[in-house]
Image (spheres, helix red, strand yellow):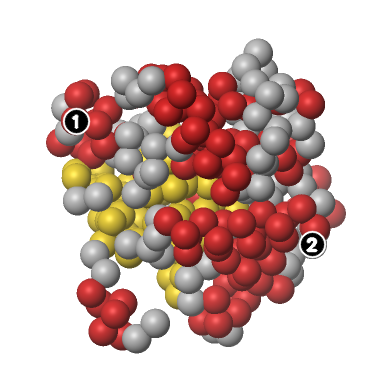
Amino acid sequence: MSVAAEQSRRTVIEVENLRTCYGKRRILDDISMSVLEGEIMVIMGGSGSGKSTLLRYLLGLHRPEAGIIRLLGKDINELSGMEWQQLRKKIGVSFQGGALFNSMTVAENVCMPLREHTRLDEKTMRIMSRMKLELVNLSGFENLLPAQLSGGMTKRAALARALIMDPGILFFDEPSAGLDPVVASDLDKLILQIRAAMNVTIVVVTHELHSAFEIADRITVLDHGRILMVGTVDEVRNAENVRVRNLVSRNSETQAVNADEYLQRLTAEVGH
C-alpha cells in the first residue's frame, strides 16, 4: 500500500497514555498505540506482558485509571450506558475458547447477537447466519451442537457469531491457541480472507509467533506492561531491542540461580 493510501485511512482505535495497576503492581504502564481502518494489528508478548489486560480495556470490560481509549472516534470513558451499548454493536469478539452456548446449535449461537440487538424476522436471521457460516467454511454444520465440533470448527463458529452484525472492529483473543499447526494455518488464512472481503479492522492478541508474522500488518510488542516497539513484521524480525530479539528468537531470559544466594534468601527471615 502506498504512503498516500495509508495516510488516507482513518484511525479507528486510539490509546493514549493508558495506565492501570493491580494493587501496587503496575500492569499497563503508559500505553499509547493506534490502529488504522482495515489494518490487522497483532498485540504480542510473553506471559505476563499485559496483552490480555490491554484487550480487556479495549473491550471496555474495565475503565482506565488513567489515559484515554477511543474506538471508532468515541472516547469510551465519556459514553453513557446506552451509547456504549450502541458502540458495542459495531464490535465483534472471537474469544479464545469460543464461548459458544452448549445447549444451542451452531446456527442459534451465530444468531444470538441478532436476536438480542435487532428486530429481524426469523427467516432473515437464518439467511444471515448461513451467509456468515459459509464465509467461515462451516456451511452445512448449522444444526450441530458445540460438543459435536472439533476445536477448529468451534473457533470458526465463534468467528461467524462475531461477524454476524458486520462489525467495524473485530477482536481475536489467542485464535490459534489449542489448535494443531495445520488448523492454525487455515485459521490465519481465514482471518486474511475476512479482512479482504469485509475491510474490517482486526486486532489479534497472541503469543504465537508464526501466526503473528503470517497475518499482521503491524505488531505491537508488549513486555512487563510497556510497549517495546510497534512495527511491521520485518521491523520486528530485525529489531535491535534485545528483549524483542529474545522474544522473536524464543531465547530464555531466565538467569541461572546461584545456590548460595538462593539458600540465603530462603533462610533470611528464619529465627526473626
Q: Residues within 10 Å of mark 1 (few under 14, many from 20)?
A: few
- Vertically, is 136 above or below 247? above
Task: Identify the residue at image location x=56%, y=36%.
Answer: 130
Q: Where does the image place residue 149, in percent across and percent down from the top left?
A: 76, 32
Above or below for 1 versus 59: below
Res. 229 visible in picture: no
Question: Furthest residue to the front?
Answer: 123
Image mark for residue 83: 1
Query: As shown in the figure, which amino acid type bears the numbered disc 2?
Result: Ala
> Which residue of the protein is positioned furthest toward the right in this rendering?
259
Residue 90: image quadrant is top left
Left or right for 166, reference 235 = left
Give the residue pinned by disc 2: 256
Kindly give the residue lying farthest to the top in the view shown: 103
How many numbered marks have been drawn onto this rendered protein structure? 2
Residue 88 image offset from top left, x and y in percent: 32, 34
Circles 1 and 2, Cβ within 8 Å, touching? The answer is: no
> Which one is in front, 202 or 137?
137
Q: Is any atom of residue 73 visible in this view?
A: yes
Along the line of sight, the residue nearer the viewer: 37 or 63:
37
Residue for point 53% across, 42% down: 132
Q: Does residue 143 appear to the left or right of 237 in the view shown? A: right
